[in-house]
Amino acid sequence: MHTTKPRVLLRGCRFVVTMDDGRILEKVDILLEDGIIKEIAERIDEKDDVVVNCSDYVVMPGLVNCHTHAAMVLLRGYYDDAELHVWLNKMWEVESRLTPDIVYLASKLAILEMISTGTTAFVDMYFFPQATAKAAMEMGIRAYLGPPFIDIILDRKEVMKELESFIKQYEKHELIRPIVNVHSIYTCDEETLLAAGELSNRYDLLYHIHISETRKEVFECKKKHGVFPVEYLDRLGVLSERTLLVHLGWVTSWEIELIRERKAKVVHCPTSNMKLATAGFFPLKEMLAQGVAVGLGTDGPASNNSLDMFREMKTCVLLQRNNYWRTDVGAYDALLMATAEASKILGIRTGMIRRGHLADLVLLNSKSLRMMPLRKDNLVSNMVYSATGGNVVMTIVNGRIVYDRSRHEELLEEAIRISERLNNFIAKGH
């Protein structure tokens, strides 16, 4: 586990994309101390610092993956050509054999991918969250975790007991934050939805749920309860400022107003929605116009099949433009969703490069064919439309360097070893 936080001096940054009122700085130093951004100035005196020459680098806030199932990297490419409900059943067949050790290894592989592509925090919903927490602590990334409520697989009372234990263990941890994970309204009954809501209220935790993802879900909810899914959550009293709604491909205009009124947060997962053929359309423009906090997520690496948030930002913009036939949503909107807006959703002082904010930062190589020609006026566009996670040379979380391109081969060897063990696990099921 990472324990020390050395002073880190980012010297002579070529560009700094602050996400603070659109400001982009040039040729400045950034001092990181005790896990926060201590100073930003033209020249900062060196002490006993780790000094990083950033003359060729773009510095930006760390990316936040607001919705994923990290350990599903185990199932990347496993059953790619099926619609959601058929696909889910195939996933659950394999997941019925999961062990904490396999989830730990898979989570570690996923986190290696995340930190190497600029993600500094992720919101996760998966089995054996203790195993994912262990991997996250070892790798030094922020993780929002909790056991999932999913009645068709797990006993509600057992999940509640596990969650309360998880909360007590991690309530004051600097990297691991407990959340209430509820799979969906079609895998959980009303009693479970209410019990999860009570825990969310009691401990002031995010209530993280898939909602309005498919036509089938919406149709069955309307038929059974007489209302649409978001309305149903509101009727139960679990739609609040703590609620994190994921997908919303089949949401109505009046439900968006409900989301705004209750100050709930939402997450868009464009790649996964298209790949699983859930159709519908996430109304980002309307959400933004209503002032709803919107984050961006890759979803799991079995349904994306990538954890690269740079790719997700580009896909987000392109999908909106394709469906609207308009260019209202742009590169800066997507970058906001993955940084500053995401930090608001998580209630944490990251997402902007400003004195006093947590030092979760990403360094990109500006001397890359994907980024050239690079100027201040085209920087954000190039980051969103041209860059990929392959441009990342360093990832810093809480003031610690958790990924350095110079160690890439070493990390790759570890990833290969993990992959071999995961492949053996899959093979035993055939």
Image (tube, rainbow, N blue to C red):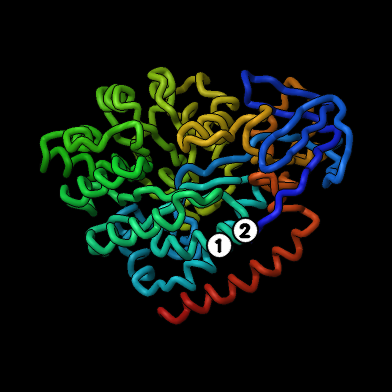
**Towards the viewer: 255 or 120:** 120
Marks 2 & 1, CB-CB < 8 Å contact? yes
Report x, y in % for residue 259. 31, 27
Q: Residue at x 70, y 63 (%)?
A: 411
Amino acid carrying label 2: it is Met
User: In which quadrant of the rendered view does residue 90 lie?
Assistant: bottom left
User: In which quadrant of the rendered view does residue 312 lie?
Assistant: top right
Report x, y in % for residue 57. 80, 37
Q: On the rendered structure, is 2 left or right of 264?
A: right
Q: Residue at x 36, y 60 (%)?
A: 165
**Towards the viewer: 5 or 213:** 5
Report x, y in % for residue 310. 61, 41
Q: Residue at x 40, y 55 (%)?
A: 168
Which mark, residue 139? 2
Amino acid carrying label 1: it is Ala
Q: Residues within 10 Å of mark 1 (few under 14, many from 20)?
A: many
**Towards the viewer: 132 or 75:** 132
Using the numbered discs, state the Cα–Cα distance from disc 2 to disc 1 in whole angstroms. Answer: 6 Å
Q: Quadrant of the N terminus?
A: bottom right
Q: Is residue 199 visible?
A: yes
Q: Is residue 299 visible?
A: no
Q: Quadrant of the C terminus?
A: bottom left
**Towards the viewer: 35 or 70:** 35
Q: On the rendered structure, is 106 left or right of 267?
A: right
Q: Secondary structure at mark 2?
A: helix
Q: Residues within 10 Å of mark 2 (few under 14, many from 20)?
A: some
Report x, y in % for residue 427. 47, 79
Q: Residue at x 22, y 61 (%)?
A: 157
Which residue is label 1 attached to? Answer: 135
Q: Secondary structure at mark 1?
A: helix
